[in-house]
Amino acid sequence: MAAKQTLISFIYVLLSLWTFSSTASVSWPSSKKSAYSLVDPVFTGYNAKDYSINLDIIPEYAQLSSANGVDVILLGGSTAEWPSLTSEERLSLLKAWRSAVDNLDHVAVKPQILFHAGDISITKAQVLASQAKEYGADAILIVSPCIMKPKTLDELVQTIKVIAAETSLPAVYYHYPALYNVNFPMDQFLDKAMNEIPTLAGVKFIDSNMKILTNATGIENGTFTLFNNDPLLAGMVAGSKGAISYTTLFPMVKNMHVAYESGDMDTARDIQRRLLEYDEIIGQYGSKSAARNLPLIFKNIDLGPPRPPLLPQTKSEFNEFKQALVNAGFLPRSEL
């Protein structure tokens, strides 16, 4: 009887350990320089003549991103105009960026690549996810289908689950309700999804709701990785583990995080105000069509025009944009 009871207890312990391991979250990024990551949602370069993708500029772009301290290259998100790209183009961009990152010289820790595999079609997303590792991704990003959308939180979890199941790579959910009109509380999503999606690593949180972000960063003892965009300083306070911004803004973001970590909140707030000023100038002169010219302005990397229906800056808008950056002190006068 005692032996039987001992065997039952042993089986119970094994089951408890299996249950714990099956619901534990995935830690990602795994090889980063600090606990706070700088996440660069890079643009897609196009040739002006026919709007074909320009793979040739990617090595220079990777150098610029790395020089600005980036930890994660976010490839194929909304900034990269993913709905305007074919699946084949998205994979070719991934392959080219993998090669460019692998060939970065004099970089102690090379950026990881977070590849967006989401699509309006679940089937297309599954195919992209299944090929992401082969083409060089370190993790995948998955947006919800945004035309025929999940109507409940459970439907969203199951949708992301069947896409994430196509690969062993860590999976990050892409939460951007203002653009994709799929809006469920991310703390509730993580609470449900962590028991359903073994590879779930976190959330790209493009949302100004700091209450939800604060709650979400506490799920599973804060082990999930959540990245956010503005307000970045508020995100740090809420527990965000990374900043999403434009390539050339990251030195300022890094300085703000250093000030925040050291308790110098006056400096951190001053930098956040400067970042908001920078972003306001970008918005005033074309928003993303202006931001995609920042690599050209700072490093002579011409990404070309965006694909229609998006419009590029006019020549006068470009010149006025550069002047505004100079006037605000973000660009030396020698650049004019």
Image (spheres, helix red, strand yellow):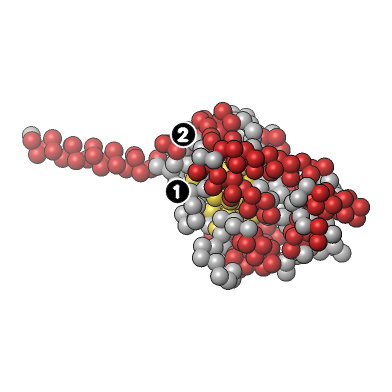
The one of 204 and 327 positioned closer to us in this rendering:
327
Q: Is residue 201 above or below residue 33?
A: above
Which residue occupies the extreme left position in the image? 1
The residue lying at 83 percent from left, 46 percent from top is 286
Q: Is residue 198 above or below residue 168?
A: above
The residue lying at 7 percent from left, 34 percent from top is 1
| Label 2 SS | loop
Q: CA distance from mark 2 to mark 1?
A: 14 Å
Residue 266 percent across, percent down from the top left: 59, 38
Question: Is residue 129 visible to us here?
Answer: no
The residue lying at 81 percent from left, 61 percent from top is 334
Give the residue number, with chain letter if any, for mark 2: 218
Q: Viewer-nearest of labels 2 and 1?
A: 2
Label 2 neighbour load within 10 Å: few <14, some 14-19, many 20+: some
The one of 286 and 99 positioned closer to us in this rendering:
286
Give the residue number, with chain letter if any, for mark 1: 27
Residue 300 percent across, percent down from the top left: 77, 64
